Image (cartoon, coloured by chain):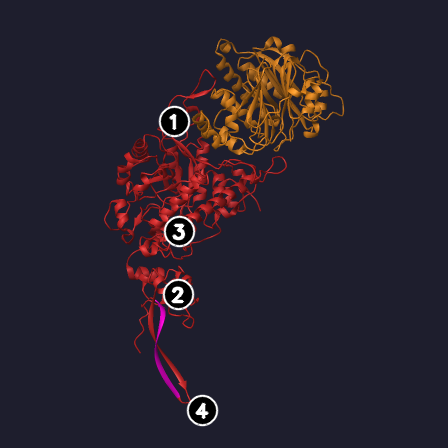
Amino acid sequence: MCRIGAIKSLNYVHPSQALLLMESQQKGHDNSGFAMVMHDLGGIFEGYKHLPTLSMACTDEGLKLAEEMLHTAGFQRVMQWVPEIDPRPGLDIHAMPNYVFETFDYPKSSRQGDQKEKEELLLDMRLKLRKALEHDEQGFVYSFWPDVVTLKEIGDPRDIGTYFRLWAPDDKFTAKVITAQCRQNTNYDIVRYAAHPFFLQGYTALANGENTFYLKNVEFQRQLHRGYIGFESDSQCFLYTLHYVHRELNWPLHYYKHVVTPLPFEDIERREDKSQLLAMRQSLAHLEINGPNTIIGVLPDFTMFTCCDAKKLRPVVVGRTDDTVVISSEVCGINDILPDRDWETDIYPHEREIVAIDNNLEVQRWRQ
Amino acid sequence: METMKVQNVTPNDMPWKIKYDASRCTLCGSCVSACSFRAIEAKVERRRMVFSEGDLPDPQQRFSAVPVIRQVKDVRHYCRGCGICEKVCPNDAIGPLRNPDTRHPIITRCIGGDSIKRGGRKNLESAVRTLDKIRVGRISQMTDPSLDAQRHTFDLLAPFGRILPAKQLPFRVNEQNSLQVESSMPPVHWIYPVIIGDMSIGALSWRMWEAVAMAVAYLNEECGLPVRMCSGEGGVPVRLLKSRYLKYIILQIASGHFGWNRIAKAMPHMVEDPAGVLIKIGQGAKPGDGGLLQAGKVAEHIQAIRGVPRADLLSPPNHQGLYSIEESVQKMFLSFNAAFKFRVPVAIKVAASATSVSVFNNLVRDPYNIVGGFFLDGIDGGTGAAHEVSLDHTGHPIVSKLRDCYLAATAQGRQGQIPLWAAGGLGKTGDLAADAFKMIALGANGVFTGKLVLQMAGCVGNDMGRCNACNTGLCPVGITTQEPPLVHRLDVDRVAQNIVNYFLAMDTEFKKLLAPIGNSSLPVGRSDALVATDQAVADKLQLQYVC
């Protein structure tokens, strides 16, 4: 089982907070990995918000190949950050030779292009890189997107934190939104790609649960979009559905809940918008999820949200202060990083709502 | 002694022999009057008794004429093994015995010079059924919990109607950040995943048809199960057409168009739309063949409903004037959609065939979005009347063909756009919930069933040659006959009650299958929930092989 956590703040937050958030929940995960996606970057990335940053773990050959491909495609590197590692003996980490966080300017031909075209270009480039580096595990390309970095590794999250020197806060590597998870050992093979959070074109999703409609979702999603690949984890389906509903169909976020956990037919019948809800349910029947799940998602505009399965079989809690909101599988994690908050304002989302947090940290509860 | 004529028909040529115990028989005559096939008769036998009186042997004989019950030696009046004689005998003096040495398939053809016709299902049993080599083998434990069939809620409904791809939905985001419907969408009804499938009034007795209709109404109005029944080809009583219960009936049109004159005339008086229209192209039990209602069953009320004289009613094998799938889509689907002003889903029923996927592909790509369901019927389906050679030797098993169609849809990302409904021997072992559930996990949205409903009503026929006389109009239990004395054997209320109870039991069983795999709605296409105990089945259906 996983434990998931997410922090959204008015201020830039260091990943040590994410490690801390997850540390006390370790009895609920198996300490087999650590993964995080950071949105709305501060520190050294703050000046490059409009340019895409590549997050990748790779061998030397992989790095060479990727840089060649990016160069050929016309991307020009404008910034590079190499984490200073602490390779002390005894750490439980399956480290890759290189961890790449490089920011690029768009190819000249695309610089004046519209935003949508750029976004498609970035996706195509990431997919190409991923495919090229798959051979002999030369590299793992996690994200290539403006204002987003991703780090994933196999091992004990505490040791991974030590290896990347993430336990000591600084102001160089920060973000206003951080999502994290501490498990690599999925139901399937141990692959770096299988670790949540998953990222696609500005959207991030992570989940605690089991998607028993995985096969239905996968078989449907494979034909929906070129970016819906991998499926190393049954929770990737949540991301792809989020991307499809919000970006491809352009439906407001609250319909995501209607797609993944539709209302029972008898409830739909009583609704004024029943024809929309029925049409949605039937057209996207294969995107429905079943089984126990809690999902945390982040949208390209940095809105963060959470929702549960229709029977609330997995826990989640939202805690907040004036400048920070934290979503976590267990309240103990929130207690560690927001010890002084008013816990009476904590929200335990129910099975028929989405809790969304906008950039002013206004918390909205949308009842399905 | 007269020369023996070996060609003469005798009871040991017949599929069933009557065992009769004269010592127990009270000669009440119940069996003879109950046998609708006139396969037994009262006769007088000449008996000779040799006896001796006195101390020394002094043989004497006495002749007597003894009344007995005897089997008729005539291929037109042969025993079907229905066992009604046994049911009515107060003393267990009589009953049919299966004759493994029967010469019936040969002598009937030799004497009649015509093909054998019968009702029922395919009678050639081979190996274990495919569905019995499949188990629901993916059980939710540990990481994801099983659900509780008694306490949790489940959504057991299936779509009937054309479903648009999400990108074609006519939605617009309004000022309130909500989706608004901009134009009309094809009608889709969410109904119970088991449709009572198309048995005509004509094939069925009026009492049987009425009992099914009553059960359907009760299931809807009292039990909350939105079960639909399909009329079959042969029209619908006008009173029902004009009633509010029409909403539970799917009207069928087949190549004979029987009954549609009345349906069309009733349209202005309809207070409810029908549940749907099903265009029957083919039938699993007799693919490539049209419907057949023998003159013996065309009673006065059937003549009235269908608008025909008393004669054999044969529906042509094809819909006349349709030469291609595209044409059928344009002519039939458009006209039937238009007939009910695009409010009623129109679906198609075809016999499973090696070509089913091609047909399905053509329909799923239909640019008009008006094909509201693909009903696929396999070789094990039942029929009221067919040539035996068709029943036993033509057709295609349903399981792999349904799966092929689903996978074809999946390969195109079009699963669910035309709901798949499967039939053909489902529930043959009496357990429809399990069969239906497995078919759903293989990709069906729902199933339809006919023969099993007759068995709920008391049909004594089986797939080993018992009875199967639905074509004769002499159904011994009043289900497939129009003879008033036979029809009155059927207790309408009890039949309706049996059907209702079976559906209620099945509903519970569906939940008992959903709960362990942790699903609260139907697992359409969730083949990972199934495992196969046969390697070939696993390979063909793309399931996990287990042993």
Q: Nearer the viewer, mark 1 or mark 3?
A: 1
Q: Position of residue B354 (x, y in %)?
A: 39, 42
Residue that extends furthest to the bottom in the rendered view of this protein: B56
Residue B418 on the magenta span: no
Asked if labels 3 and 1 touch by Cβ distance under 8 angstroms, the answer is no
**Mark 3 neighbour class, 10 Å CA radius: few under 14, some 14 to 19, many 20 or more:** many
Q: Which chain is orange?
A: A
Residue plotted at (41% across, 24% down): B168
**Mark 1 neighbour class, 10 Å CA radius: few under 14, some 14 to 19, many 20 or more:** some
- Range of magenta residues: B59-71
Q: Which residue is mark 3?
A: B121
Q: Nearer the viewer, mark 4 or mark 1?
A: 4
Does label 2 or label 4 sit earlier along the sequence? 2
Q: Which chain is red?
A: B
Q: Which mark is residue B17?
A: 2
Q: Is residue B180 visible?
A: yes
Chain on which label 3 sits? B
Disc 4 secondary structure class: loop
Measure the C-alpha gap from mark 4 to mark 1: 101 Å
Q: Which quadrant: the N terminus of chain B?
A: bottom left
Q: Is residue A351 left or right of residue B270?
A: right
Amino acid type at mark 3? Arg
Identify whether A202 is placed above or below A184: above
Measure the C-alpha gap from mark 3 to mark 2: 22 Å
Q: Quadrant of residue B241?
A: top left
Identify whether B282 is placed above or below B479: above
Question: Is there one chain holding both mark 3 and mark 2?
Answer: yes
Q: Which mark is residue B55?
A: 4
